[in-house]
Amino acid sequence: NCSKNFEENKTDSAFIFVTELIKFTEDNKLASQKANALITLGNIHYIVGDYSKAIKNYTKSLDFYQRENNKKGEASCYNNIGRIYRANWNFDGALNYYNKSLYISNEIGDTLTIATNLMNIGNVYNLRFKPDKALEYYNQCLELFDAMDNDSKISMTLINIGSSYIIKKD
């Protein structure tokens, strides 16, 4: 239900649903589910451009994942925080968080998150008008997405590679 609201960009409905979910997880002492719901709430705030609230929710979730030694959750939070920094044109901050996520993802062998972080890092280099550096990252993530047969991510990567060549004027 919540994901359908996201797809249809019904952020008001998604916000209400996730707020109710958070209350439910608190009432029933479901800490792990609450951390996941906080990420979703952060995503809603990100979509509507309320970055300070998004970071607040991602950070709360990150704190939980660190206490529980949930590396996959940590990597997800770092990646999401990196998106906020990138959206605010703080590319050094974005790279810092993407690299934290990438390090953890490599540590636990989470190929999808590794590839996603490589793409996000490439995006930062494209925004910095460093297309050759971006292409290094895009080619790495393309190889991983190809090995996973992830057609939607392959097409996104190819679009990004095309953007790099446009920046290069090749």
Image (spheres, rainbow, N blue to C red):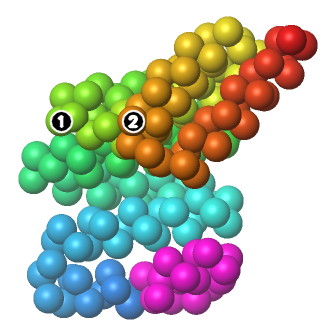
Residue that badge 2 annotates: 147
Looking at the rendered structure, the secondary structure element under dot 1 is helix
Residue 98 in view: no
Looking at the rendered structure, the secondary structure element under dot 2 is helix
Given residues 19 and 80, the one toward you in this image is 80
Label 2, label 1: how far apart the Cα atoms are: 18 Å
Q: Which residue sits at x=44%, y=45%?
A: 149
28 sits to left or right of 14: left
Given residues 73 and 156, the one toward you in this image is 156
Residue that badge 1 annotates: 108
Residue depth check, mark 2 versus mark 1: number of the one nearer the observer: 2
Tell whether position 4 is magenta.
Answer: yes
21 vs 100: above or below: below
Label whose residue precedes the other's in the sequence (2 or 1)? 1
Find the magenta span and give its range.
1-18
Tell whether position 10 is magenta.
Answer: yes
141 vs 150: above or below: above
49 sits to left or right of 52: right
Location of residue 158 (image quadrant): top right
Residue 158 in view: yes
The disc placed on residue 140 is none
Instruction: Pick the quarter of the image with the C terminus.
Output: top right
Kindly identify the amino acid type of the residue bearing the numbered disc 1.
Ile
Whether tag 2 and tag 1 are in contact, CB under 8 A, the answer is no
Q: Position of residue 10 (x, y in %)?
A: 65, 83
115 vs 54: above or below: above
Q: Position of residue 95 (x, y in %)?
A: 50, 25
Q: Which residue sits at x=54%, y=49%?
A: 151
